[in-house]
Every structure is written in structure tokens, then in C-alpha cells.
Image (cartoon, helix red, strand yellow):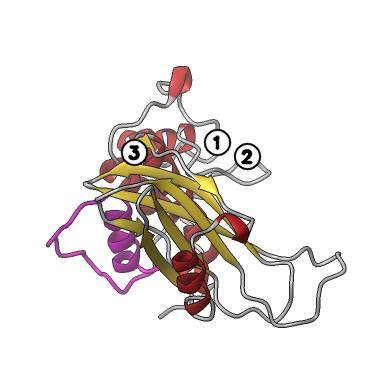
């Protein structure tokens, strides 16, 4: 695996996953690193229809678009107005630059957030006081503390989702929900692992960040769409 760039095959697989699609399509040159313009075209053609607002029909405001085809320019404008891809401080899109891995992660996260925003929100409550939790939930949360992952606990009145971030070497870590929606016959959750401020005084001890959500009782599967966030 290329440590700095993303291959065409990797990006295709991830875009299909966040779009909720399955494909047996053979990707041309899957081991080659993907360029930013290739990423824009793939995203624009694969993502479900989304509202780009009143700016949706306007071209993207980048200075280096002249060499692109009309279709490529439309793809860049589409992902730009969706807030999924941006340019640099010099006003350039850099279409032929190879896509960096960290950059791809940010783009895919933004795309996934936009997709989730189209679905029906599920009401939830973040539980911070253990005193209000049933004993069964406390027990399961304690058992799930060490390994990153999701534990589901159903009670008579609610469904509890325990999301564990695993072992961390210092304090300052927490897990925050960014989306809880209903779609594709399941409850879909996105979270963000919040890291300690490097300039802050941080507890120098092993910690185990954990998030507990209380949802109305559900009978659908509950899925964490970005489990890799907990392993990062």
C-alpha cells in the first residue's frame, strides 16, 4: 500500500462503500495512484443526487481549469459546490496532482457527511452520567472498554449504543457523534475521535474514551459507518 497516495482501486472501493453501492466493475489500472481530477470525476458520477444550492450551476472558481474537458470541469464544479473538494490558497484546484492519503480521508469524510444529511435523523441523547444507565448497560460498557468498536444494548424503553475508542496513552480523547440517521434499512452512525490539544495540559495516564448514546428502541441493525475513525 502506498503510504502517501491513494490508488485508483482503493478510491473506487471507498466511494462505492460510502454511497451504499455494490459493483463488480473492473477498475482500470487499480494499482496506479489517483489524481485529483480522477477523484472529482468518480465522486461526481457516483454520489447520489444532492442539492448544491443556488451556486450549483456555476463553474468552480479555480484558475487552472482551462486544460480540462467540459465534463471534467462540471465534475470539479459539482464536488466544489457540495463542499467535498476544494482548492489551495492560490486559487488552484491542482487537477493533475496525485491525491494524498490524508486528503482523500477528508474528502471521503465530507462526502459521507453530505450523504448522511439526506437521510432521516434519529433522535438520540448522549449519556454522560452513569447513574442514569441500567446496570446491564454499565456492565456491557465496562466489558467493551478496551477494544475499539460498537456494543448494542436493548432495554425495555430504549436502545443504548456504546462506542469505545480503545486504549489511549494520555487523556484528552473523546468521541463525538456527527450523524445518527435512518437509511438503507438500518440506523447509521458517524463519529469523530477528538484528540487532545497539543498545547494543553494533558493527563499522563492510560485512558479509554467511550461514547454512550440512548436511542428510542429500534429493531433495525445499528451500524457505525466509519469504524476506522476509532482505530486512528
First in sequence: mark 2 vs mark 1 = 1
- Closer to the eye: label 3 or 1: 1
For disc 3, the neighbor class at 10 Å (few under 14, some 14 to 19, many from 20) is: few
Per the rendered image, the range of residues in magenta is 5-33
Q: Whole-percent x and y of residue 159?
A: 38, 53
Whole-percent x and y of residue 110?
A: 48, 47
Contact, CB < 8 Å: mark 2 with mark 1? Answer: yes
**Front one among 201 and 75:** 201
Q: Is 13 part of what is drawn in magenta?
A: yes
Numbered tag placed on residue 91 in the rendering: 2
Q: Residue at x 55, y 77 (%)?
A: 166
Cα–Cα span, label 2 and label 1: 5 Å
Q: How far across and how far down the image is residue 99, in percent?
A: 47, 61
Mark 3 or 2: in front is 2
Disc 1 target residue: 62
| Residue receiving disc 3 | 69
- Residue 12 in magenta? yes
Prevalent SS, magenta region: loop
- Of the 4 image quadrants, the one containing the N terminus is bottom left
Q: Earlier in the sequence, mark 3 or mark 2?
A: 3
| Secondary element type, mark 2 | loop
Residue 170 in view, yes or no: yes
> How far is the residue under mark 3 from the one under mark 2?
19 Å
Tell me, yes or no, whether the two marked residues, 3 and 1, touch with CB atoms within 8 Å. Answer: no
Quadrant of the frame with the C terminus: bottom right
Residue 98 appearing in the image: no
In the structure shown, which secondary structural element does the residue marked by tag 3 occupy?
Answer: loop
Amino acid at each position: 500500500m502506498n503510504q502517501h497516495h491513494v490508488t485508483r482501486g482503493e478510491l473506487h472501493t471507498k466511494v462505492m462503500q460510502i454511497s451504499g453501492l455494490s459493483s463488480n466493475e473492473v477498475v482500470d489500472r487499480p494499482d496506479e495512484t489517483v489524481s485529483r481530477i480522477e477523484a472529482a470525476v468518480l465522486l461526481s458520477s457516483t454520489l447520489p443526487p444532492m442539492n448544491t444550492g443556488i451556486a450549483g450551476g456555476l463553474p468552480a472558481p479555480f484558475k487552472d481549469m482551462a486544460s480540462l474537458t467540459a465534463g471534467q470541469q462540471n465534475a470539479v464544479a459539482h464536488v466544489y459546490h457540495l463542499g467535498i473538494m476544494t482548492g489551495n490558497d492560490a486559487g488552484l484546484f491542482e487537477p493533475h496532482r496525485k491525491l494524498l492519503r490524508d486528503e482523500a480521508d477528508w474528502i471521503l469524510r465530507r462526502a459521507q457527511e453530505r450523504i448522511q444529511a439526506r437521510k432521516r435523523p434519529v433522535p438520540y441523547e448522549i449519556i454522560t452520567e452513569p447513574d442514569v444507565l441500567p446496570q446491564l448497560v454499565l456492565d456491557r460498557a465496562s466489558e467493551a472498554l478496551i477494544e475499539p468498536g460498537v456494543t448494542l444494548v436493548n432495554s425495555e424503553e430504549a436502545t443504548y449504543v456504546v462506542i469505545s475508542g480503545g486504549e489511549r496513552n494520555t487523556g484528552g480523547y473523546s468521541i463525538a457523534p456527527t450523524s445518527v440517521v435512518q437509511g438503507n434499512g438500518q440506523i447509521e452512525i458517524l463519529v469523530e475521535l477528538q484528540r487532545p490539544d497539543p498545547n494543553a495540559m494533558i493527563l499522563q495516564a492510560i485512558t479509554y474514551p467511550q461514547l454512550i448514546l440512548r436511542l428510542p428502541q429500534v429493531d433495525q441493525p445499528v451500524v457505525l459507518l466509519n469504524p476506522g475513525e476509532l482505530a486512528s
